[in-house]
């Protein structure tokens, strides 16, 4: 019976697992056959073991298929490719040593929390340590077994112990990171980035061409010039991170093996150059990991800043709603007054118009009064709507007088309800402010709300709040001032009043002043408590002025 859509039927799962296992074995044998370009006097190793690198990537991910494929592949490689193992029973033992050794090393690396995504320098260092440790363990065990079986003499073992290690080491160091990184969707997407492809291709071609040229000059010259390969590898690592380093190193390794075989270098030269390549690989991978980790940290920082900005915007909007919620009842009362007056004026005009001898001038006067009251109510509602409007902050030249007037319009209902007088004092011909009008309006409203709350809690009979705006002493900023004759600010609270969650209100969230400080600082301004004395509490903040724009030069939004 067919499974649910998107699911593999139960009967097909063993077949899929078997096909993946067979595929891994075929890949291992193909790579063993391709890389078997030098013989080490009967020792079952190659100059470069890329098949082991592929399967070790699977072992680091905890794949059982990779372990089974390594055992079967190593056995078949000894039997089919003629690696010098005398009989099938010894081939099984050699394969078991290789498999158990690398499975144990991979599990140990996983226990040390090696992340197979290789996002950190630590993970790359662990991978290189696992490659060295695995090669040492497996190489030592193979030498002990081959000595005991009589397949290897002591003198030969002394000569061939390092070739047994370097092939596996370089196979894991070059191929495993390439396999692990290339399996990630984000890394694969880089292959469509022209900048990435161009940079990596240039470095890989430069490294490969350099290798072939050096080897063509003879063994001694090639040894001396090998250190110059660090230049293209480090270039790829710094420009394109770990992914660029992996590709450039793979191209270098292929060019090295091709050149060594093309120009007739012997097994000893193979081992010497592979040793140099192992050092180059370690340096390139670590440089690439440092570059990738730096770029990842930079991306995380940018994302964190964007998220912080988004959360600050949400917090500011929540604070605006909290503020307006507190104003709701007073706002309703304030709107009700002009609407009631407008209705009374309209009814009076209606009765005058119905009189036998209508006084048209009086009718017109009452109609005009009614329209004025309706316009007043509409202005209150329009200011509230603008204040609550959500969207990306839009900065534009805005007159300080408009900001102050809109803020007072919104706060006046609450002030009337709490019996607090509010007034404004704006210097004429002030330069415009290049700002987000709604956000600066919110800062003023937060400060006025705090003043009204302080006056109310202290039960001051003649409470008054004054909002001022004038040109700052440096002539490049506009200074806003909110002062009241309330009970003052406690010095201990003043030291932390702009921190989040700092509040003296019983029902306060402690966000108002923190959000206000964030808004002002985002406008390249500064906010502070000028005076906390009783009867003379004064908050000030400054924001940059828009050069050359004065009152009357800017058309305000309707």
Image (cartoon, rainbow, N blue to C red):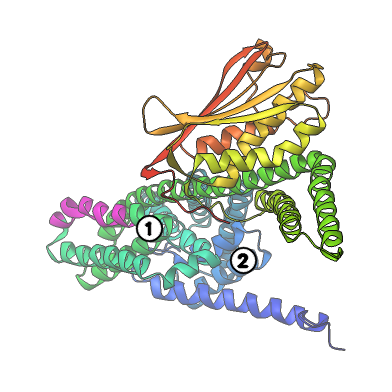
Q: Residues within 10 Å of mark 1 (few under 14, many from 20)?
A: many
Asked whether residue 35 appears in the rendered view, the answer is yes
> Is residue 210 shown above or below 480?
below
* Front position in the image: 552 or 56: 552
First to last magenta residue range = 220-236
Residue 527 locus on image (x, y percent)? 54, 27
Quadrant in which the N terminus appears: bottom right
Q: Tag 2, which secondary structure?
A: helix
Q: Is residue 221 magenta?
A: yes
According to the picture, the residue beneath numbered tag 2 turns out to be: 66
Magenta residues, dominant SS class: helix
- Residue 97 appears in which quarter of the rendering? bottom right
> Is residue 204 shown above or below 309?
below
According to the picture, the residue beneath numbered tag 1 turns out to be: 240
Q: Earlier in the sequence, mark 1 or mark 2?
A: 2
Residue 285 locus on image (x, y percent)? 40, 51
Quadrant in which the C terminus appears: bottom right
What residue sits 63% from the left and 49% below the top? 110
What residue sits 58% from the left and 38% below the top? 404
Asked whether residue 525 appears in the rendered view, the answer is no
Q: CA distance from mark 1 to mark 2?
A: 30 Å
* Front position in the image: 163 or 50: 50
- Residue 207 appears in which quarter of the rendering? bottom left
Q: Is residue 535 magenta?
A: no
What residue sits 52% from the left and 75% below the top? 27
What residue sits 60% from the left and 66% below the top? 71
Q: Which mark is residue 309?
A: none
């Amino acid at each position: 019976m067919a499974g649910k859509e998107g699911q593999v039927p139960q009967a097909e799962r063993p077949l899929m697992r078997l096909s993946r296992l067979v595929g891994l074995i075929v890949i291992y044998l193909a790579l063993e056959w391709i890389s078997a370009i030098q013989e080490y006097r009967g020792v079952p190793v190659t100059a470069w073991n890329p098949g082991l690198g592929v399967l070790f990537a699977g072992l680091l991910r905890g794949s059982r298929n990779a372990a089974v494929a390594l055992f079967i592949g190593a056995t078949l490689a000894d039997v089919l490719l003629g690696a010098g193992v005398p009989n099938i029973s010894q081939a099984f033992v050699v394969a078991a040593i290789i498999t158990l050794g690398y499975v144990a090393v991979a599990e140990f690396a996983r226990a040390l929390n090696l992340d197979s995504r290789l996002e950190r320098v630590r993970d790359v260092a662990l991978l290189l340590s696992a490659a060295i440790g695995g090669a040492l363990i497996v190489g030592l065990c193979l030498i002990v077994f081959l000595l005991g079986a009589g397949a290897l003499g002591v003198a030969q073992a002394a000569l061939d112990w390092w070739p047994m290690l370097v092939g596996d080491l370089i196979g894991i160091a070059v191929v495993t990171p390439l396999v692990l990184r290339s399996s990630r969707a984000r890394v694969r997407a880089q292959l469509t980035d022209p900048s990435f492809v161009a940079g990596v291709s240039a470095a890989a071609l430069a490294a490969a061409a350099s290798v072939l040229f050096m080897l063509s000059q003879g063994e001694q010259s090639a040894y001396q010039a090998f250190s110059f390969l660090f230049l293209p590898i480090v270039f790829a690592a710094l420009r394109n991170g770990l992914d660029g380093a992996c590709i450039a190193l793979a191209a270098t390794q292929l060019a090295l093996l091709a050149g060594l075989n093309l120009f007739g270098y012997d097994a000893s030269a193979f081992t010497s150059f592979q040793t140099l390549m192992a050092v180059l690989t370690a340096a390139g991978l670590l440089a690439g990991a440092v570059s990738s980790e730096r770029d990842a940290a930079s991306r995380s920082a940018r994302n964190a800043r964007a998220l912080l900005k988004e959360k600050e915007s949400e917090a500011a909007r929540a604070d605006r709603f909290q503020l307006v919620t507190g104003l709701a009842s007073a706002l309703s009362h304030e709107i009700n007054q002009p609407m009631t007056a407008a209705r009374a004026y309209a009814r009076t005009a209606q009765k005058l118009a119905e009189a036998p001898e209508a006084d048209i001038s009086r009718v017109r006067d009452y109609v005009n009064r009614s329209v004025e009251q309706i316009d007043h109510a509409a202005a209150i509602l329009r200011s509230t709507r603008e204040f609550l409007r959500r969207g990306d902050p839009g900065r534009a030249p805005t007159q300080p007088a408009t900001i102050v007037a809109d803020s007072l319009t919104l706060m006046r209902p609450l002030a009337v309800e709490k019996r607090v007088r509010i007034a404004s004092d704006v210097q004429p011909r002030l330069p415009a402010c290049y700002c987000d009008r709604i956000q600066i309006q919110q800062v003023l409203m937060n400060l006025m709300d705090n003043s009204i709350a302080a006056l109310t809690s202290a039960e001051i009979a003649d409470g008054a709040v004054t909002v001022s705006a004038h040109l700052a002493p440096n002539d490049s900023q506009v200074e806003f001032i909110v002062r009241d004759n309330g009970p003052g600010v406690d010095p201990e609270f003043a030291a932390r009043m702009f921190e989040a969650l700092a509040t003296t209100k019983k029902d306060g969230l402690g966000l108002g002043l923190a959000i206000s400080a964030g808004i002002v600082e985002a406008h390249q301004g500064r906010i502070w408590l000028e005076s906390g004395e009783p009867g003379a509490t004064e908050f000030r903040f400054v924001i940059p002025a828009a050069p050359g724009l004065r009152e009357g030069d800017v058309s305000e939004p309707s």
